[in-house]
Amino acid sequence: MLKTTIRNIYTVICCLVIALVLALGVAVIAGYQPKVLLSESMEPEVIRGSLVFVDTNATLDQIMVGDNVVFDLDGVQILHKVRAVHTDDGVVESVVVSGLGSSDETLVDSSTFIGRQGATFPRLGKYFYWVEKDGMWAGISVACVLILIGCVPWNRKKK
């Protein structure tokens, strides 16, 4: 009974890991970049530690006031809310962004624009940040544990 329960738990974990890897792969192929929100600048709308998928196919022309966008500021990617859109002859030249609790505004043009916020998963980013930070060793450790559990002879018959 215990072996069956352990085997079922292992199967569920493996299926979840495979589904997560496939979902991330499809998202990346579709032009979405997974990012982990490390600051509290967008709380309470997007909490620190959230996994945010950024639509890198979005263009500055598609951005409207109220959208959340990711941009590059001196090598750091930042998620902020669009406060104003500047156009020239109907073409969006730049947008003004700021964090939710801040009055500091930043001008974002096409050279610093990365994309628009897509799907967001609260708190899930903490795990991905840990894997990214500790990198290869974390992934190898999880894979080794799953392989070892999978090698246990579950159907061994007693003589």
Image (cartoon, helix red, strand yellow):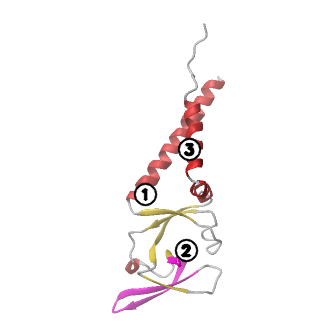
- Of the two numbered discs 2 and 1 in the rendering, the one whose residue sits closer to the viewer: 2
State the residue lying farthest toward the front: 137
Q: Main secondary structure of the magenta part?
A: strand
Disc 1 to disc 3: CB gap under 8 Å: no
Element type where label 3 sits in the image: helix
Q: Quadrant of residue 158?
A: top right
- Left or right position of 47 against 18: right
Disc 1 to disc 3, C-alpha distance: 23 Å
Q: Where does the image place residue 140, in percent across and percent down from the top left?
A: 56, 44
For marks 2 and 1, the one nearer the N-term is 1
35 lies above or below 24:
below
Label 3 sits on what residue type? Ile
Question: Would you name the residue on which mark 2 appears?
Answer: 78
Give the total number of marks visible in the rendering.
3
Per the rendered image, the range of residues in magenta is 72-98
Question: Would you name the residue on which mark 3 appears?
Answer: 140
